Image (cartoon, rainbow, N blue to C red):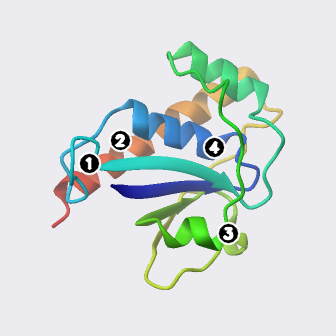
Amino acid sequence: MKTIIFACVHNAGRSPMAAAWFNHLGPRETPYAESENGVRAISAGTSPADRIHPEVLQVMREVGIDLSSAQPQKLTLELARDADLLVTMGCGDKCPYVPGLKVEDWPLEDPKGQPIERVREIRDEIRRRVEDLQSKLAHST
């Protein structure tokens, strides 16, 4: 199974939403597909928070995704080394460098402390980007 890591600073907003969307939207026929569940997404942070932001839990619950059991984890070199793609969201040069690891950066606003309407917009933008990534993976050779 191949792994995509979505990473942000605290692993409490953007990256858990992205990993949840990727896994929720289901496996796509991609070059990564080695089995029925050929690719999985996980999330991590360079400086993980104690918990997922409440506003993130709320907006994801609104679309039928329950992140209440998600626990922020640290993005380590070992975790990144086992990945096939690292998608960063605001952690920039704090993310570990792994030779040969493909890295893509998504400049997304941190949802922490934002009005709920703005958190919904960020959630929806993340979904669009995840769908684009899945489409790109499906059409890559």
Residue annotated with mark 1: 135
The x and y percentages for residue 50 are 84, 41
Disc 4, disc 1: CB below 8 Å? no
Mark 4 falls on what kind of element? helix
> Measuring 52% from the left and 42% from the top, which residue is drawn there?
18
The x and y percentages for residue 2 are 35, 58
Name the amino acid, label 2.
Glu
Disc 1, disc 2: CB below 8 Å? yes
Name the amino acid, label 4.
Arg
Q: Nearer the viewer, residue 124 or 2?
A: 2
- Residue projecting furthest to the bottom: 99
Disc 3, disc 4: CB below 8 Å? no
Name the amino acid, label 1.
Ser
N-term-proximal mark, 2 vs 4: 4
Residue 14, labelled with which disc? Answer: 4
> Measuring 33% from the left and 55% from the top, which residue is drawn there?
1
Residue annotated with mark 3: 92
Residue 131, labelled with which disc? Answer: 2
Quarter placement of the C terminus: bottom left
Mark 3 falls on what kind of element? helix
Name the amino acid, label 3.
Gly
N-term-proximal mark, 3 vs 2: 3
Q: Nearer the viewer, residue 53 or 132?
A: 53
Q: Nearer the viewer, residue 120 or 93?
A: 93
The x and y percentages for residue 71 are 70, 38
N-term-proximal mark, 3 vs 4: 4
> Measuring 46% from the left and 35% from the top, which residue is drawn there?
21
Q: Report crowding for label 1: few under 14, some 14 to 19, many 20 or more residues within 10 A (C-alpha).
A: some
Q: Nearer the viewer, residue 35 or 120?
A: 35
